[in-house]
Image (tube, grey):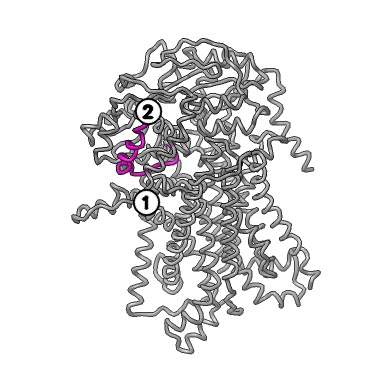
């Protein structure tokens, strides 16, 4: 037994250690170069605001996602598959693009206020804490919904049938089937969103409405760029990591396996209750679709006019971005699967931390630290793309890990002993057991990783030379040169490519699973 | 095998440096080197005269440039740094990484500017830009703006150089009364953005009546989009200036070439590329004059702190700003 576990047993801790090193070494390098380590009163305000908005964003996203995911799980309607795919889109938007899309709906001259004014009602302002939370819900509700939907789909058909034959109503179904599933999935969902929002930067300042809406990441920006106070930057980044780590441990403590046992993989939806519940589900689905699709539509319409005005550099930079995204997706999937399988065999705090902390790193400190570490050995510019891929893998791995973990746990519980007794190990176990059974979450996760890597700008900005710009960098350069139409068009291409990559992986995974 | 690959990778990078033609490396901000910035024209013109290879290395924006130089320290490959501004100059000088340029340039700047380490290459006045068709009577002072119910977007002084410029503008114009002005402005400020492009984007999308930008911004719309609806509000207090400068790094391995580049920077070939790419005033007015629209909004009074004053004023002004705007 111990022998058979060895290949994965060694690979996972090594990988976890590498990930932790990738997070901690740059931080240490930055701290090493810094002199002063003291924080200011304004830094503590930033910490407080970061935490407050992150908790609110995570709670609202998750609370809203639960009924939406349930409606998606138990209803069948035309366009359901398209809606599930669309759910991937907002999460993949670069922050600045998402903000512009939201403003087209909720802004001063946006759709909502036009309607309100026409009805003789006072207009509402999107700027402030509520705007920050609204934007974070827009970006993260789809991710939460998809993660929860995976949970609903993972309830074996046999349990659902048993529930039906016992005459379970919606309340009993919730108590015996849905609640255990939520108990397993929700802590992870809350955690991921909390940590993403903790490090959010552009959304928070832009929609925050003033300096009281300040995050830790902004304080780090200020410390590095204007003050070159690397000591303070390292302390702040360390604090951010500690908060992320704490959240990871709390979530880890609260998550409980649902323990449904295995089934025969027949597809069976939960009973769809009729009556008023039908109306509620329909309303939920329509509202969620409008909330997610209208800003996306605005992004599309905003980008179209500038398409003819795009500079030729868009093409090579798009190709570079796709290459980076594919390489990152492949590596991330392999790494996340390794960690999730090992964690399902034997849960360990080390694995949990290694798979969560990268989310809580400060992009700026990570980039700066890697720059300091690489510079003595090679010109950082020469390594721009490899470094970008490496960072993308570290930053998107936590999402994949969270998506895979409930499924690898179920796999281990249901088939682990059978596979062990059949001496099904190594490649054949992967080929005949793991990959076929995890195709759906793997496809979804790889899609997320690819799309996130398309949009990631944080690190390339420090390393990119004249001829290495990726598409997000081109978008920000165009916007910085008054060319807002061209920037919107390039952003549209970026979003379309991210979405296409996401769709290809996600649909591929679902097809293999079906 | 891996070592071979790494060596091959490093060699391809090192090869151009070993070739016959000397390489001049200029560290600058992103928008200078982009294909719609001044970079390509400048590179072509300089390489025609210098028998060298001019390479621009982009490094984010002005503030990122300063951080980058300090990160690289004396080990930097760069010879010249182009694109710092007067609010950052004192901090840049304090790094002791720059060498004196030893020149006494003749420029058309509206204020006297002489610095032993840095040479100006372009400049502009900060101003609030608005749409004439939507705002027929713009405010003429900060006080009038604060008393109005106009909505403005500004940049964050903690992450962007225009944001820092506005902070110094209010300080230079109002001194000890600056905190009061900020308190008055608090209800006018819709939001604060991380950088210039986000703020300008919000303004163009109709989220605000005015945006902190430059007096030359309307010229962009006029020339590039044939749109003359944008205007810059001229304030009686005077307008704070941003002067963009370049300097030679002391550790440069091409000091003569670097000097040559700094001389070239103030010639017509370089200066005439600036107005319609950087949308700033060139430090030396080109022989062909300034493009249309550059003379439309000229403030009567220019404000500018010395680099040392700016450096000293920043932290207290920032605290003042944060306190006044915290709700």
Specify whether disc 1 shares its chain with disc 2. no
**Mark carried by residue B126:** 2
Q: Nearer the viewer, residue A41 or B191?
A: A41
Judge whether A324 appears above or below A419 on screen. above
Q: Nearer the viewer, residue A20 or B5?
A: A20
Give the secondary structure at mark 1: loop
- Badge 1: chain ID: A
In the image, taking residue A453 as reference, residue B136 lies left or right, namely left
Name the residue furthest right.
A3
Quadrant housing the C terminus of chain A: bottom right
The stretch in magenta equals B176-195
Give me the residue at 53% from left, 79% from top: A157
Residue B312 in view: yes
Whether residue B185 is in magenta: the answer is yes
Residue located beneath label 1 in the image: A128
Judge whether B7 appears above or below B39 on screen. below
Judge whether A348 appears above or below A328 on screen. below
Quadrant housing the N terminus of chain A: bottom right
Residue A264 figure quarter: bottom right
In the image, taking residue A98 as reference, residue B93 lies left or right, namely right
Pinpoint residue A307: horizontal percent, then vertical percent.
41, 39
Q: Nearer the viewer, residue B242 or B309?
A: B309
Whether residue A62 is in magenta: the answer is no
Pinpoint residue B14: horizontal percent, then vertical percent.
71, 28
């Amino acid at each position: 037994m111990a022998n058979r576990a060895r290949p994965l047993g060694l690979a996972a801790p090594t990988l976890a250690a590498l990930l932790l090193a990738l997070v901690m070494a740059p931080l240490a390098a930055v701290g090493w170069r810094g002199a002063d380590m003291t924080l200011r009163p304004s830094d503590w305000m930033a910490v407080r605001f970061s935490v407050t908005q992150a908790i609110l964003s995570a709670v609202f996203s998750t609370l809203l996602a639960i009924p939406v995911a349930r409606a998606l799980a138990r209803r069948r309607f035309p366009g359901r598959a398209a809606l599930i795919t669309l759910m991937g889109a907002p999460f993949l938007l670069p922050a600045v693009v998402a903000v512009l899309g939201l403003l087209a709906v909720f802004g001063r001259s946006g759709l909502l206020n036009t309607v309100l004014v026409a009805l003789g009602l006072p207009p509402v302002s999107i700027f402030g804490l509520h705007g920050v939370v609204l934007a974070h819900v827009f970006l993260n509700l789809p991710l939460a919904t998809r993660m929860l939907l995976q949970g609903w789909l993972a309830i074996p058909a046999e349990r659902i049938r048993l529930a039906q034959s016992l005459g379970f109503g919606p309340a009993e179904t919730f108590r015996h089937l849905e609640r255990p599933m939520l108990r397993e999935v929700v802590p992870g969902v809350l955690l991921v969103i909390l940590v993403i929002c903790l490090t959010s930067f552009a959304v928070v300042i832009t929609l925050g409405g003033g300096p009281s809406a300040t995050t830790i990441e902004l304080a780090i920006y200020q410390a590095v760029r204007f003050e070159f106070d690397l000591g303070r930057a390292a302390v702040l980044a360390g604090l951010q990591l500690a908060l992320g780590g704490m959240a990871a441990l709390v979530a880890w403590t609260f998550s409980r396996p649902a323990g449904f046992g295995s089934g025969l993989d027949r597809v069976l939806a939960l009973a769809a209750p009729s009556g008023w519940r039908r109306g509620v589900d329909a309303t939920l689905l329509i509202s969620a679709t409008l909330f997610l699709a209208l800003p996306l539509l605005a992004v599309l319409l905003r980008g179209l006019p500038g398409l003819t005005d795009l500079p030729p550099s868009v093409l090579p930079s798009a190709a570079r971005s796709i290459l980076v995204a594919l390489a990152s997706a492949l590596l991330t999937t392999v790494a996340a699967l390794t960690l999730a399988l090992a964690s399902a065999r034997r849960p360990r705090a080390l694995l949990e931390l290694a798979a969560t902390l990268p989310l809580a790193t400060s992009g700026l400190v990570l980039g700066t630290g890697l720059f300091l570490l690489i510079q003595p050995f090679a010109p950082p510019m020469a390594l721009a793309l490899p470094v970008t891929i490496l960072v993308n893998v570290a930053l998107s791995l936590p999402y994949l890990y969270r998506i895979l973990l409930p499924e690898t746990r179920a796999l281990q519980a249901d088939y682990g002993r059978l596979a062990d007794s059949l001496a099904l190990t190594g490649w054949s176990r992967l080929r005949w057991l793991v990959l076929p059974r995890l195709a759906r979450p793997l496809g979804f996760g790889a899609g997320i990783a690819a799309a996130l890597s398309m949009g990631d700008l944080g690190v390339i900005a420090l390393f990119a030379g004249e001829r290495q710009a990726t598409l997000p960098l081109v978008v920000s350069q165009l916007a910085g040169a008054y060319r807002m139409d061209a920037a919107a068009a390039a952003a549209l291409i970026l979003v379309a490519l991210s979405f296409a990559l996401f769709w290809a992986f996600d649909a591929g995974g679902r097809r293999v699973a079906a | 095998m891996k070592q071979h690959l790494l060596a091959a990778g490093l060699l391809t990078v090192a090869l151009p440096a070993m070739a016959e033609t000397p390489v001049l490396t200029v560290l600058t901000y992103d928008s200078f080197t982009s294909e719609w910035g001044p970079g390509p024209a400048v590179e072509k013109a300089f390489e025609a005269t210098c028998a060298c290879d001019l390479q621009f290395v982009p490094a984010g924006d002005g503030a990122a440039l300063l951080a980058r130089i300090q990160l690289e320290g004396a080990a930097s490959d760069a010879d010249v740094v182009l694109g710092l501004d007067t609010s950052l100059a004192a901090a840049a000088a304090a790094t002791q990484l720059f060498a004196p340029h030893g020149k006494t340039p003749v420029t058309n700047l509206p204020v006297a500017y002489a610095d032993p380490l840095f040479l100006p290459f372009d400049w502009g006045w900060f101003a609030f830009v608005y749409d004439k068709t939507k705002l027929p009577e713009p405010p003429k002072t900060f006080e009038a703006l604060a008393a109005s119910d106009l909505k403005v977007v500004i940049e964050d002084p903690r992450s962007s150089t225009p944001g820092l410029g506005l902070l110094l503008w209010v300080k230079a114009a109002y001194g000890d009364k600056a905190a009061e002005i900020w308190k008055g402005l608090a209800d006018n400020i819709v939001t604060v953005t991380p950088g210039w492009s986000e703020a300008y984007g919000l303004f163009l999308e109709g989220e605000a009546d005015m945006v902190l930008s430059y007096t030359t911004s309307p010229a962009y719309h006029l020339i590039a989009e044939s749109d003359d609806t944008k205007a810059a509000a001229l304030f009686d207090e005077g307008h704070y200036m941003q002067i963009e400068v370049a300097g030679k790094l002391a550790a440069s391995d091409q000091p003569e070439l670097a000097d040559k580049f700094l001389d070239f920077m103030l010639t017509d070939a370089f200066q005439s590329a600036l107005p319609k790419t950087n949308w700033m005033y060139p430090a030396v007015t080109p022989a062909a004059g300034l493009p249309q629209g550059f003379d439309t909004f000229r403030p009567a009074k220019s404000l500018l702190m010395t680099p040392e004053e700016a450096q000293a004023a920043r932290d207290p002004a920032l605290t003042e700003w944060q306190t006044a705007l915290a709700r």
